[in-house]
Structures are given as C-alpha cells and as structure tokens.
C-alpha cells in the first residue's frame, strides 16, 4: 500500500509528553481480510507466549493467526450466535481457548486441532435461577477462585458460578445488577475477588472465598462500557462508559481518583490534526507505568492519548497515531509491547487492530522515511542491548 509522510504534532507539556525528538517512526505494514463478506472483527486476544492470537468474528467463528507473521492457523466454529468474549486459558492448559456466546454456551477449544474440547456450560439445560429451556445470552466469563476452578459468567442481569471440573452450578447472583452484565473478571493478584460491570452503571466486587453473596458494591459511572486493571498489585482500575466518560478507581477503597466527564472532547481538543468519534480501549504499560486511552474516528484512524490520572488529571496530545490501515470503525486493539514474547519485541512489532471493515491490520516499527503513522518511543519496549536486533519483514 502506498504511504505518505505524516508530520508529528508539536506536543504541549501536559501529561509529561515527550519532545518531538523522542518519536520513533513506525508504519502500517499489512492487512488481512478475515472473510469475503461484511463480517466484523469483534475481539483480538493473544496467547500468553504470543505464539498465536485469536480473532472473534461476526460470522460466529474464531480464527487463529501468528501475531509475528500473520500466518493463518485455522478456525474454531460451533457457536450459533454472536461471540461476546474470548480468552486463552492459563499456563496449565495454554493451548485451550474459551469463548462465550449469545447462543447460551461457554465453550472450550483445542487450538492445536481447532476442535471443541467439551461444551463447558450450556445454559439451555441449567434449571437453577433460569427457566428450563430458556436460552440465555452469555456476555462475559472468567476463570479463577482460590483453586482456579471457579467459572463466573455474566448472563443478562445475573452472575452465575460453576465448578468447571464437574460443571455443577454453585451460586447465582440476581440482586447486584438490573441490566446486562457485560464484564466479569477475577482480579489477577487477588484470585478470590471478582469484579463485575453492567450497563446499569455499577461495578461490583465479590469475595468468592466461602459463601458468594450480593453485598459488596462499587458504584461507578452510568452506562459502563469497558474497564480494566492498571498498576502493579491491581488495586486500581480504569472505566470507560458508553457516554464517553473515563475514570480511574481504587477498587479496594471504593474511591474514584480521577474522572473525565467529557473525555472524548478533551481528547479531540488535544488532537490538532483530527478528532475522536469514539473510544476503543485503554492500554496500561507496567514498564512505563503509564495509561493511554485509545480513540478513533469513523474513517479508521486511531490515536493513543496519555492519561494523567493523579490530581486533577489530564488527557494529553496523542503519542501514537495509526492511520492508513482501516476504512471504518475499529473494534479491537492488541498491543504487543509489554507482553511476553521477546521475538515480537525484537522485531519491532507494535500490535494488531481489527474493525468493522473485516480487516486485521499489522503495525510494525520502522526506520523508513515512508510511513503514514508515528509513535512515541515511550510506547516501544526496547530489546536488551546484549542481543542483536534482527529485522523481519514477512510481507
């Protein structure tokens, strides 16, 4: 694809933005058309060792690729409705991929054979808390608990728990949320703690060690869209809402530390060459100890905006702009920096994006003078100096 230079914007001092001399050039390298139809890319998730990435599509299938070369590995197909969430298993079973769907099932896939291991849970046959035969949508799931054998899932306004070893339901929470539970996640460093979020505007914290109840709540913004953990120890989390607000919370103390009520306007005001139509996600780098909110426009361009979440807070000018890859709204971003897998870092791979144009776009650091995009060096994880950097151009 023909590319053109893009001038780096002059950076104001807010959010400790680096000087223009610290910017490292990078560019859009290739795109993969996931199907020959009007399918969307919903989500991209990496395997823990970065040897594979899974991509959920609006065709109710999950495809697997190499995140380093883009090579197609195969697909997992079995869901009969939209796939709402996918996640690789932990270190004990790294080849297993889990998925949940609006067809009422949570499934496990062997990514070596692309075959279903076993239907983990089928809500069509669950009678406790759900009318028998009444198909329930599953929006999210998480595996954790004190022994890592507890499966939690958000099903409409309920949170259901199973012991995944015997598929036995152990709890059902019906009073915590009054609308769809869009996210559930066990806290990485506190495996008995479960965080749930719903479009009713609540984030709830549950202790799953012992009796699981509907008592502990952390109230957040209205119409919560997405959240994630940040900082070592996982005591803070960021929250994005459907009404374009961004906030940072201390979940242990139930305190809101910073709140941007019109985050999209702040980001647009700081982006002198374009504007933000929507937010895709947030990215926290433990190496840099920094948070970025990722915004995009309807033409398919993305930008990384640094977030200062201490004190009054600020959203700075973009430190990375990804343009020239997508032709529509971007749904998912998978950064490679800060992940396991030195190979990707040594080859300067920045990450992958997927969107409503059905494309997977591959972004690679490059010292070439011909690029459509640019990035701050603070977003790049440098290879150790003792190792010789090899450059690989699979395309």
Image (spheres, rainbow, N blue to C red):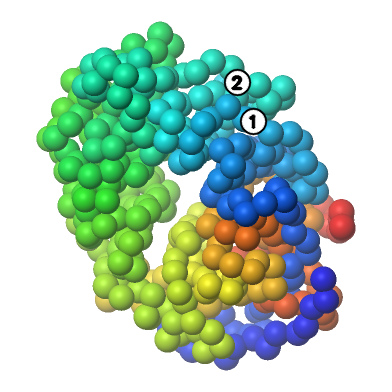
Residue at x 14% of width, y 35% of height: 175
Residue at x 18% of width, y 43% of height: 178
Asked if the residues shown at circle 1 and circle 2 are in contact, with their CB atoms under 8 angstroms apart, the answer is: yes
Pick whichever, 158 or 218, lies toward us.
158
Residue at x 74% of width, y 54% of height: 32
Residue at x 33% of width, y 30% of height: 136
Measured as percent of width and height from the top left, residue 285 is found at: 52, 57
Q: Is residue 82 left or right of residue 72?
A: left
Which residue lies under the disc numbered 2? 116
Pick whichever, 21 or 386, lies toward us.
21
Label 1 sits on a secondary structure element that is: strand
Residue 380 visible (yes or no): yes
Residue 382 visible (yes or no): no
Residue 76 image label: 1
Alpha carbon of mark 1 to alpha carbon of mark 2: how far?
8 Å
Pick whichever, 368 or 221, lies toward us.
221
Q: Earlier in the sequence, mark 1 or mark 2?
A: 1
Measured as percent of width and height from the top left, residue 37 is found at: 67, 51
Pick whichever, 372 or 386, lies toward us.
372
Label 2 sits on a secondary structure element that is: strand
Judged from this view, the residue extending furthest toward the top is 166
Determine the image quadrant of residue 347: bottom right
Quarter of the image containing the C terminus?
bottom right
Measured as percent of width and height from the top left, residue 147 is found at: 39, 18
């Amino acid at each position: 694809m023909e590319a053109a230079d893009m001038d780096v914007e002059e950076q104001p001092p807010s959010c400790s933005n680096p000087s223009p001399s610290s910017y490292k050039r990078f560019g859009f390298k290739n795109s993969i058309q996931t199907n020959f139809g009007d399918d969307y890319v919903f989500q991209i998730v990496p395997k823990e060792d970065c040897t594979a990435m899974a991509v959920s599509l609006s065709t109710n299938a999950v495809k697997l690729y190499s995140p380093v070369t883009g090579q197609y590995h195969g697909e997992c197909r079995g869901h009969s409705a939209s796939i709402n969430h996918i996640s690789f298993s932990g270190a004990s079973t790294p080849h297993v991929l889990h998925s949940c769907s609006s067809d009422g099932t949570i499934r496990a896939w062997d990514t070596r054979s692309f075959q279903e291991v076993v239907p983990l849970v089928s809500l069509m046959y669950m009678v406790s808390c759900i009318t028998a035969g009444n198909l329930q949508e599953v929006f999210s799931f998480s595996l954790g608990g004190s022994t890592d054998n507890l499966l939690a899932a958000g099903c409409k306004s309920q949170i259901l728990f199973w012991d995944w070893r015997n598929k036995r339901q152990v709890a059902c929470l019906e009073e915590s949320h009054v609308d769809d539970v869009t996210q559930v996640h066990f806290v990485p460093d506190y495996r008995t703690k479960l965080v749930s979020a719903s479009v009713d505007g609540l984030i709830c914290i549950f202790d799953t060690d012992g009796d699981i109840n509907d008592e502990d709540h952390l109230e957040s913004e209205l119409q919560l869209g997405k959240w994630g953990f940040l900082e070592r120890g996982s005591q803070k989390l960021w929250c994005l809402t459907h009404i374009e607000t961004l906030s940072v919370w201390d979940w242990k103390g139930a305190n809101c530390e910073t709140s941007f009520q019109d985050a999209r306007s702040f980001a647009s005001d700081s982006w002198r060459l374009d504007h933000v139509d929507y937010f895709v996600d947030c990215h926290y780098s433990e190496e840099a100890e920094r948070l970025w909110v990722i915004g995009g426009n309807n033409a398919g361009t993305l930008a990384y905006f640094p977030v200062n979440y201490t004190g009054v807070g600020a959203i700075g000018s973009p430190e990375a702009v990804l343009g020239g890859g997508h032709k529509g709204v971007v749904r998912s971003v998978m950064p490679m920096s800060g992940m396991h897998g030195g190979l990707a870092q040594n080859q300067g791979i920045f990450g992958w994006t997927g969107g409503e144009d059905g494309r997977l776009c591959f972004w690679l650091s490059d010292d070439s003078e011909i690029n459509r995009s640019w990035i701050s060096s603070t977003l790049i994880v440098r290879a150790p100096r003792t190792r010789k950097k090899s450059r690989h151009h699979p395309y």
